Amino acid sequence: MSERAHHPDADPAAGGPVGPLTGVRVVELAGIGPGPFAAMMLADLGADVIRVDRATDVDPAAFGTPHPDLLNRGRRSIAVDLKSAGGREAVRALAGGADALIEGFRPGVTERLGLGPADCLAANPRLVYGRMTGWGQDGPLAPHAGHDIDYLALTGALHGVGRAGERPVPPMNLLGDFGGGGMMLALGVVAALYAVRAGAPGQVVDAAIVDGVSVLTTMIHSLRGVGRWQDPRGVNLLDGGAPFYDTYECADGRHLAVGALEPRFYDELVRRTGFPLPGDDAPERTDPANWPALRAAWARLFRTRTRDEWTALLGDSDACVAPVLDWREAPRHPHLAARRVFVEHAGATQPAPAPRFSGTPTALRRPPPHPGEHTDEILAEAGFAADRIAALRAAGAVA
């Protein structure tokens, strides 16, 4: 694994821009999950992201050491009491000099604080105001709490994840919070920034996880529409129903992922493995009625060798087989190591920025900050004089 904290083409020490969003300033009102992920994506792409943390979370003794939350990487932090007049003044000043602001409160919270879209766009008509929620800014459920699993449940996505005849399985919070939530917010902010650069005014980006997850399921709705996807889970081509698109236990209790969908890839898998074992049949794979017997035959074969023995046989081929790696193993896989998919930065192994850019390469520039680590520096950049900063600190408006 590379010790460099950037991709091979990125060389911040050489000077010049780092990342395609260099020169863009974003204010992030601190939250959890998808909001910080969107801010991380923007920071990874080169934006100058200022994280507005809670004044009550400040611990000066921690300054100078990386915060353990990697989602906060790449930015500076100012600590503010948003309920104080001085704190709101500070945030409005930051928004006035920013290109974008993102927040993840329930609908109406920033409006009550005097930091809603109308307040910030009045001070900065070119501002992109990004809003991250689960249910959206309107609709019957908008005022209520929810979590990733709830948003997946309502969109139908959760229904489709799991084994046939068994209950749905939460796919961690990758699909909702990060795929349908934070990633959609980051895309929306970048699109709106592009519009502003083309002469459009600033606007509000309403990124709701239920919207984003629903978009992610477009292909499934398309397949349902032409009769190629059944509603019961675990019986379809891509949900574990097909024996040639599934995981299998090996002799050592570890697993292989098999994705030999197309006939030529399946033929390669058969040729390399010698499938089936003596005494087993190899029924026609295109008939779903044969899938239970075919799965059982493949399961017996894969249990004859360890995961790594199968990987050595099948890994460098078009059989579309990969070892199921754990969190510790993944960064050390030869392919991921060669591409520097994981890097070590500020003492923490973590995924490198993605995607990659030939002309404006990205880099990890800052470790995650502790709340309030850059308060004075950020306020000074926003035009606050030293005596005003001192007064805000004395009043508890900032920390």
Image (cartoon, grey):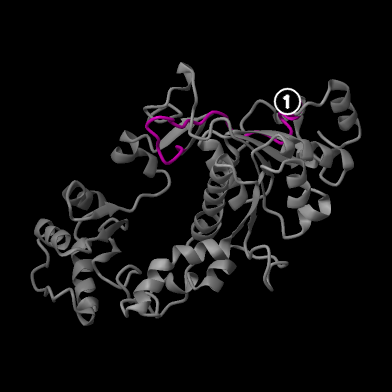
Q: Is residue 342 left or right of residue 277?
A: right
Residue nearer the viewer, 267 or 382: 382
- Look at 57% across and 67% down and name the residue there: 151
Percent of width and height locating residue 337: 34, 36
Q: Is residue 98 above or below residue 245?
A: above
Q: Is residue 240 above or below residue 327?
A: below
Residue 381 covered by magenta stretch: no
Crowding at label 1, few (<14), some or many (≥20) Cα neighbours within 10 Å? few
Percent of width and height locating residue 42: 55, 40
- Look at 50% across and 67% down and name the residue there: 214
Residue 371 covered by magenta stretch: yes
In the picture as drawn, the residue positioned furthest to the bottom comes out as 289
Can I make out residue 301 in this image?
yes
Dot 1 lies on which element?
helix
Percent of width and height locating residue 188: 55, 51
- Look at 52% across and 58% down and name the residue there: 180
Residues shaded magenta: 351-378
Residue highlighted by disc 1: 381
Quarter that holds the C terminus: top right
Percent of width and height locating residue 39: 59, 43
User: Residue 40's image quarter?
Assistant: top right
Amino acid type at mark 1 = Glu
Residue nearer the viewer, 188 or 67: 188
Majority SS type along the magenta span: loop
Can I make out residue 116 in this image?
no
Q: Is residue 308 above or below residue 45?
A: below
